[in-house]
Image (tube, rainbow, N blue to C red):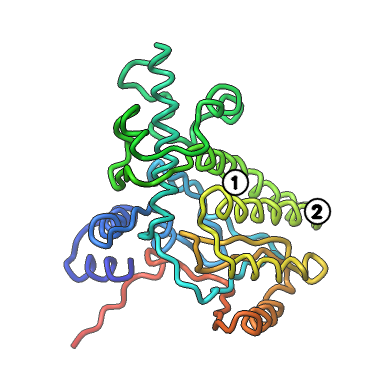
Amino acid sequence: MATLFALAAQLELDLTPTALAHLGQRVENHIVGAPCGLMDQLTSSLGRADSLLVIRCQPDQILANRHLPPGVHLGAIDTGVKHSVGGLNYGRARVAAFMAHAIILDHLRALGTVGPEDDPFGGYLSNVPAAEYERAYRPLLPAELSGESFVARWGHHGDAVTTVDPDLEYRPLAAADHHLRENANLPIFLADLEAWERTRDPAWLIDAGERMIAGHAGYRDDLGLGAEEADLLLDLAMAEGPAAGVYGGRITGGGSGGCVALLGDERLPALLPRLAAVYAANTGLTPTVIHGSSDGAAASGVLHQVF
């Protein structure tokens, strides 16, 4: 994204930060071959220091830059294990979620309650109401399904940047479960932070942390995007727990390695290096400590160098 912002400035192109984020996603999808969404590109472009960028990826709605409440800190430790959103597991998890969406739509179209080309959820599985999903659609989804069987019965899965591999096994039920649970957890997480800001009751940070831990478990168990090293880091952090100023955490981004993000209070910055040292001693890997955040590319701007 930094490169795209610099190129756009040099070429005097009138492109919005969101348009540049879409170009970044196109590079990832069609040049790198990574079937990622827009989260990283939008955050790198439109994020603000010490804030949470609230995105509804339908496809690029920015709902808010929520400044972290006083006393709340976010940090991360890089496991030293490289992840890749172009890897097999990430693509398989994405395909499985699209399979679930296609199966639900096929069911509704067969009932005749929607037209043959209609999608009452606007193209997004996350728009399925949670109660409706549990009662009406969840029983329809296979726990395991081969790509060959899916294509034979349902045809295309509806995703433009992935393909269904007939030789692979997919888990549509687990992928949909995680998808809907994560979508439901986000507003609760944000409400927990707001309640902490008003009340200063640590119970709200504990609940917010538990939402993060649930997301971590879902990445691992439902999507197959966990990593033993990330589990170890989170276990070490939660062994310290609220008594030491850390309330929760989760694997980030594409999973299968990468960073573990941690939610804490004013004691977290001092705790992070100690956690990293214990992790290094247990794994022989070299972790990297990250604390705080900076403005994204749109707010930082472009430095022009005259030669």
Is the residue under label 2 in contact with that under label 1 (CB below 8 Å)? no
* Image-based side of 66 in relation to 269, left or right: left
What is the secondary structure assignment of the residue under circle 1?
helix
The quarter of the image holding the C terminus is bottom left
- Quarter location, residue 96: top left
Going from N to C along the chain, the mark reached first, 1 or 2, is: 1
The residue at the far bottom in this view is: 307
Residue 99: x %, y % from top left: 40, 36
The quarter of the image holding the N terminus is bottom left
What is the secondary structure assignment of the residue under circle 2?
helix
Q: Crowding at label 2, few (<14), some or many (≥20) Cα neighbours within 10 Å? A: some
Mark 1 lies on residue: 186
Q: Which residue is at 71% across, 77% downward? A: 271
Tally the marks. 2
Residue 131: x %, y % from top left: 61, 27
- Residue type at mark 2: give it: Ala
Residue 82: x %, y % from top left: 45, 71
Q: Crowding at label 1, few (<14), some or many (≥20) Cα neighbours within 10 Å? A: some
Q: Which residue is at 73% across, 71% downward? A: 266
Residue 295: x %, y % from top left: 46, 68
Q: Which residue is at 28% across, 43% downward? A: 160
* Image-based side of 306 in relation to 20, left or right: left
- Residue type at mark 1: give it: Leu
Q: Which residue is at 23% across, 68% downward? A: 9
* Above-or-below relation of 58 to 79: above
- Quarter location, residue 228: bottom right
Mark 2 lies on residue: 203
* Image-based side of 273 in relation to 117, left or right: right
Which numbered tag is attached to residue 114?
none
